[in-house]
Image (tube, rainbow, N blue to C red):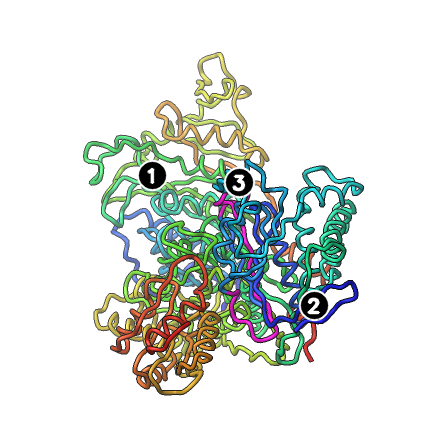
Amino acid sequence: MAKEEKNGKKIQQLENVTVMFAGDSGDGMQLTGTQFSDTTAFLGNDLSTLPDYPSEIRAPLGTLYGVSGFQLHFGSSNVYTPGDNPDVLVAMNPAALKVNVKNLKPRGIIICNSDAFDAKNLKLAEYDSNPIEDDSLSEFKVFPVPITSLTIAALKDCGLKPKEVTRSKNFFALGLMYWLFNEPLEPTLEWVNQKFAKKPEIICGNEKALKSGFYLGENTELFASRYKIAKAKLPSGTYRSISGNEATAIGLIAASKLSGLPLFLGSYPITPATDILHHLSKYKNFGVKTLQAEDEIAGIASSIGASFGGNLAVTTTSGPGLALKTEATGLALMAELPLVIVNVQRGGPSTGLPTKTEQSDLLQAMYGRSGESPVAVIAATSPSDCFYMAIEACRLALKYMVPVILLTDGYIANGAEPWRIPHTSELEKIEVTQRTDPEGFQPYDRDENLARPWAVPGTPGLEHRIGGLEKANITGNVSHDPENHHLMSQIRAEKIENMQKVIPDIEVDGDEEGELLILGWGGTMGSIIEAVKDARKKGLKVSRAHLQYINPFPKNLGEVLSKFDKVLVPEINMGQLAKILRERYLIPVIQFNKMRGLPLKTFEITEKIAEILGGNND
Amino acid sequence: MTDKIDVAELKPKDFQSDQDVRWCPGCGDYSVLAQVQKISPKLGIKKEDFVWVAGIGCSSRFPYYMDTYGMHTIHGRAPAIATGIKVARPELSVWVSTGDGDLMSIGGNHFIHACRKNIDLKLILFNNQIYGLTKGQYSPTSAKGKVTKSSPYGSVDYPFNPTSLALGSEATFVARTLDRDTKHLQKMLLRAGEHKGIAFLEVYQNCLIFNDGVYKSYTDKETKSDSIISLEQGEPLLFGKNFDKGIKLDGFKPVVVDLNDGKHSIDDLLVHDEFDEAPIRAFIYSHMTDDPSMPTPIGVFRQIRKQTYDEAVNEQIDIVTAKKGEGDLESLLFSGNTWEVE
């Protein structure tokens, strides 16, 4: 469907598009991608993003390993993933082209900065000849644009240094993309004006680069058509674009307000969790105390202290940091103090892939401590779900006086999606009781959930001692009694199991019985939803369910699983949930595992479904 | 559990918990416990506002014996846990009982950062120069050559001097005392308790079982006057049975002088100023420690007042709140670029 525009160019309607911005890690690709996402969201498209960058801050220019990318999938129908393969690739240099062209769809569009395709950069990208001049890209539509020189020409009167001028070339590319997808410049211009209010020459540079890119599309014969994506049919309400880490931070503040407890965050910087610390440290006027600790252990230790002191205490980290917090997590569960541990999973083990995603800390979260040490483990399924699961983590920790590990991952933490913002009145209050009555007080007394009373220092008459040594049930005195240790071990496990009474049952999307159920957990939800949709389009009969609660599992999980002949568990690990399911329910599950540091590709899951069901997948 | 007691009426026994004290008979820890219980009522702090935090080791059992709020935590982490308590609840008086293994080895990082940040904690280091609870291995404060179960041919490690380390980490209160000198111990505990900011008190504590007599020369009647020098505010550095020996500076090097040699007078001696902003002089004294040719100093090395961490945190919250107004969740949720979907 195309219609003619005034200047003779066609506008093509598309249902959805995947765009990849790629360049050197200093080229500003993340910013470019974020701006494009925000404008797209603002226009009413649904979207999902995948920032994909190296762990070096400014890797050597032009290298293959220094390529930073930002993938964005937007459309008029529900968008659940950042897209398997881009339709459009913006490549700021040969390395960016080389790394990303293999994912581009056939007949996909390549817009490249032809100025950067010089001998030196071609060599760095290991090209023997210039790909925009030879026929190696013949299956794509290639648009070489001298972005650097056009930017230099456009910015000559802004009074910027040469380095600052060339740094603006990402905005030239952004402007061209805005033209190509029929999007307005205003949201980005507004952002530039706010961000650089005190630097008029930077505003000048960004504005001119952006507009020049836009006008290049408008006024030249480069592109014969441009594209438009209709608004998505989303539920009515007020929306904003949100990343998982920001949603986690706001969720924690919401939990603080809902519980009436001051929020304390003890944290040590670690990729990709640090943004939660950044966000929370901005909100001092919410009474939030953020302590940037000397190390990961002090991060959790200070939170344990704050929890003893009666605050809503949180620590945030990623895999290697969770490993360092192991012993202290055991202390929190032994002392029966409420504590939220947010683990933004990344590729491991060891330093692994700091900027890439993985789901490989599930077993560490479940079992990675000394002794019998059950903690609650829950997982967020999308960027905006981090908001709700952060509140949920706080609610469970406070109700049961236990540590709760909230698992998110690098993909949903850094990725963004439109979020229908809830009103405060829609959020359920968190009931908290701190003991004040000295009459009959016992530090390890039990309520109906087996939670012990929270008696905070400063309360007269409730002076008591807690700690890591085994305590006698009820009195809380140090105890080495064999029967008591057996009892306490059981109580600690039972407290977690008791949560099944309050956590929601797992729901099945599709028939509640049949040949195949796809069961996922956490951040793979989008990929699985899209894969199941595609499979159904191909006539395959498949049901889907997704876990947010892993310890404990929803109480109906066993029953749900028993209704299907086969259960497929896709994970970005070697089969960690699969292992737990087999052990718990004694069922054979089929694994699907990829560890590339990237979200699961939809088509691969669809292929697996087809393979299991014996259908064809063309 | 006790009923609420008026601060003015608090007695040492109000700080005694109902738990049996389980240190070895004759352990120096008993002395510290008794003096802490003696000085606590004098601080004008409500009983429910005391919190004792400990890590792992003999001295770390301390909180169980105090009828205050307490936490017996994990090895080395007590200063970090105490930091969380203090930052969350600035009105509390937070104390840490710790040992040389707990604080100087596994907890070394937390120690220097608690000093650097001037967290308002009272750190009481029971330094017995040995790992007691694990039955006798050399510690980070054991002398080089120390023969223990894990160093049968003598330790090859150089020891830490905890007081130097505290001064080097810019602690705002640094003092040292002896378990056997109960009066001095009591005075130092009181001073630490009254200090606003990080208060580091090193207690030379005798381990009867695994390191008996390590501080013998500092506590024995015959030797102590020559081997110990007591730092007194505004006073020259004098020691010896008849206070006829003193310390003067030769460049940056402290030297012992005899006041009866006809060449030196009291005016030549270093005069102690614990309120000196610069920790340089205090650092020079701290290096006189365990030098057989010099007396080892006890007393307050340094006490200065600077903004504590929790004061700074709360000041910042007040400033930001005054500027931005108290945070409103609804407006936070709806902040940033929003758009309407009909």
What span is colored magenta in the figure? A55-83
Q: Chief secondary structure of the magenta span?
A: loop
In what element is the residue under mark 3? helix
Q: CA distance from mark 2 to mark 1?
A: 75 Å
Residue placed at 65% from the left, 54% from the top?
A: B316
Q: Position of residue A352 (x, y in %)?
A: 40, 51
- Report the residue marked by disc 3: A122
For the residue marked with disc 3, what is the amino acid?
Answer: Leu
Q: Chain of mark 1?
A: B
In the depicted view, which residue is nearer to us: A454 or B249?
A454
CA gap, disc 3 to disc 2?
Answer: 35 Å
Q: Is residue A186 above or below residue A147?
A: below
Q: On residue A11, which mark appears?
A: 2
Q: Secondary structure at mark 1?
A: loop
Three-letter amino acid code at disc 2? Ile
- The residue at the point 52 percent across, 48 percent down is A67
Residue A226 is situated, as x and y percent measured from the top left of the image, at 68, 63
Whether residue B8 is visible: no
